[in-house]
Image (spheres, rainbow, N blue to C red):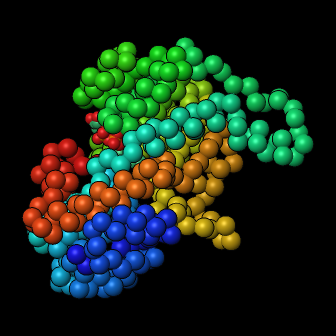
C-alpha cells in the first residue's frame, strides 16, 4: 500500500524500513507534522501514518478523503488526537497499536520514582562538579511504603508488579479490578482513599473527559503531605498550575512527569537554542524535586520494533480484507470514553 508517514524521526525511519522488509509497502517519509499546512502532501496516498502529536481535525480529514486516503494508521495506542466521528462519516478507517511495550512505560515510571527518591538527578550534577556532600539527598525506603496505582490496565499492572518487588503495599483505583493485580495483593479503594493513603501515586489511566484534571487542587488537598506524584500517561490528567501550587506548599513532595498538558508545543523537538515561552512549564523546571522527561517512556528498541511491526501488519490486513483487528471503532471509542 502507498503510505505517507508524517512526523518521522531517524529512529522511526530505521524501525519502519527494517519491518517493511517483510511487507514491501510503498513508504514515503515526511519529517513534518501532519497539519492544515502539510495535509496536501498526502494527496494520492491510500494510507497516512501519524504519531500522537499530529492532530487530525475534520477539515484535514475532508482534504485527505478527497485526495484518496482510506486509512489512517496511528503509531500509538491513544487516539484522542483524531476526530473519529468525522473519519467515520467520510468512510476513513482508523487503526492503532493497542499495546507495544507496557514494560517500557512501566519501567520508566519506576525510573522516575527511584530518581526522585534518591535524587539521582542532583547527585549526578554534584559529583561532576566535585561536590561530594550528601546534604539534601536524603531518600526513604520504598520497602513498606504505600503505592497508589490509578488505572490498573496493562501498564498499571506491570508498574504495580515492579513496585511489589520492592516490598511496597499496593492500592489501586479502577472501575475494573484486574485479577493480576488482585493476585499480587493489591487492594482496590476509592479515589479519595487512594489520595489520602498513598506515599507514591502513579497515573496509568487514559485521558478522557472524565479524567481530565483528575489531579486538581481538590485532589492535591486530599493527599498526604509530601506525596510523590508520577504521570507517564497523559499530561492533562494533572492540572499543572495546581501541581505547582502543591509543590510550593509542600503538599506534593516529588513530581515526576513524562507527559505535560501543553507538550505538543515542546516535546520531540530540539528547542535548546530557543526561548521557551511556556512560563508554567519553565516554573516546573525550577523545582529541585521535579523531574520532567519529554514523552520518552515508550522509547525502547523493543517498543519501536513492535510499533513498526503492528502498524505495517494493520495496513496489510486492511489492504487485503478491508478490515483490521486493531481498528478504532467509533462506537467502542464512545463506549470506553476514548483513550
Ligand atoms: P489499558 O487500557 O490497558 O489500561 C487503562 C486502565 O485505566 C484500564 O484498566 C481502565 O479501566 C482504567 N481507567 C479508565 N478510566 C479510568 C478512570 N477514570 N480512573 C481510573 N482508571 C481508569 O491502557 P495501558 O496500555 O495500560 O495504557 C495506559 C495509558 O498510558 C494510556 O492511556 C496512555 O495514555 C499512556 N501511555 C503513555 C505512553 C508514554 O510514552 N508516556 C506510552 C503508551 C501509553
Q: Quadrant of the N terminus?
A: bottom left
* Residue 312 falls left or right of residue 150: left
In front: 209, or 40?
Answer: 40
> Could you say which quadrant of the image residue 212 lies in?
top left
Q: Which quadrant holds residue 47?
A: bottom left
Residue at screen point 64% across, 35% down? 116
Asked whether residue 62 appears in the rendered view, the answer is no
The residue at the far front in this view is 22
The number of numbered badges drawn on the structure is 0
Q: Residue at x 56, y 30 (%)?
A: 228
Q: Is residue 39 above or below residue 225?
A: below
The image position of residue 275, as x and y in percent, is: 66, 69
* Front one among 245 and 281: 281
Q: Residue at x 28, y 26 (%)?
A: 178
Indicate the position of residue 10 as horizontal and vertical percent values.
50, 69
Spot occupied by residue 100 in the image (x, y as percentages of width and height)? 35, 49
Q: Quadrant of ligand 1?
A: top left
Q: State left or right for residue 213 relative to residue 131.
A: left
Q: Name the side, left or right, on which 136 lies relative to 266.
A: right
Task: Reply above or below: 48 against 148.
Answer: below
In the image, farthest residue toward the right:
130
- Regarding residue 68, the answer to whether it shows in the image is yes
Question: Whole-percent x and y of residue 229?
Answer: 52, 34
Between 29 and 140, the one lying in front of the other is 29
Q: Residue at x 83, y 41 (%)?
A: 127
Amino acid at each position: 500500500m502507498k503510505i505517507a508517514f508524517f512526523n518521522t524521526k531517524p529512529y522511526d525511519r530505521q524501525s519502519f524500513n527494517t519491518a517493511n522488509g517483510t511487507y514491501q509497502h510503498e513508504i514515503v517519509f515526511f519529517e513534518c507534522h501532519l497539519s492544515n499546512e502539510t495535509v496536501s502532501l498526502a494527496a494520492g496516498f491510500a494510507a497516512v501514518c501519524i504519531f500522537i502529536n499530529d492532530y487530525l481535525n475534520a477539515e484535514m480529514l475532508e482534504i485527505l478523503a478527497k485526495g484518496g486516503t482510506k486509512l489512517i494508521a496511528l503509531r500509538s495506542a491513544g487516539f484522542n488526537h483524531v476526530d473519529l466521528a468525522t473519519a467515520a462519516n467520510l468512510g476513513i478507517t482508523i487503526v492503532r497499536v493497542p499495546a507495544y511495550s507496557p514494560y517500557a512505560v512501566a519501567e520508566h515510571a519506576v525510573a522516575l520514582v527511584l530518581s526522585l527518591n534518591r535524587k539521582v538527578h542532583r547527585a549526578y550534577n554534584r559529583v561532576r562538579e566535585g561536590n561530594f556532600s550528601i546534604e539534601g539527598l536524603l531518600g526513604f525506603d520504598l520497602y513498606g511504603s504505600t503505592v497508589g496505582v490509578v488505572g490498573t490496565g496493562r501498564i498499571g499492572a506491570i508498574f504495580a508488579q515492579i513496585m511489589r518487588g520492592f516490598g511496597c503495599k499496593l492500592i489501586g483505583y479502577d472501575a475494573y479490578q484486574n485479577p493480576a493485580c488482585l493476585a499480587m495483593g493489591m487492594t482496590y479503594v476509592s479515589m479519595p482513599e487512594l489520595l489520602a493513603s498513598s506515599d507514591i501515586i502513579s497515573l496509568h489511566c487514559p485521558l478522557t473527559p472524565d479524567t481530565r484534571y483528575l489531579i486538581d487542587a481538590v485532589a492535591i488537598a486530599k493527599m498526604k503531605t509530601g506525596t510523590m506524584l508520577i504521570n507517564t500517561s497523559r499530561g492533562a490528567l494533572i492540572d499543572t498550575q495546581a501541581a505547582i501550587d502543591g509543590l510550593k506548599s509542600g503538599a506534593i513532595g516529588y513530581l515526576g512527569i513524562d507527559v505535560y498538558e501543553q507538550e505538543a508545543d515542546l516535546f520531540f523537538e530540539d528547542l535548546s537554542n530557543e526561548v521557551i515561552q511556556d512560563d508554567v512549564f519553565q516554573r516546573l523546571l525550577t523545582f529541585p524535586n521535579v523531574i520532567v522527561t519529554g514523552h520518552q517512556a515508550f522509547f525502547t528498541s523493543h517498543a519501536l520494533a513492535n510499533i513498526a511491526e503492528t502498524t505495517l501488519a494493520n495496513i496489510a490486513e486492511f489492504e487485503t480484507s478491508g478490515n483490521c483487528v486493531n481498528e478504532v471503532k467509533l462506537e467502542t471509542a464512545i463506549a470506553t470514553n476514548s483513550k
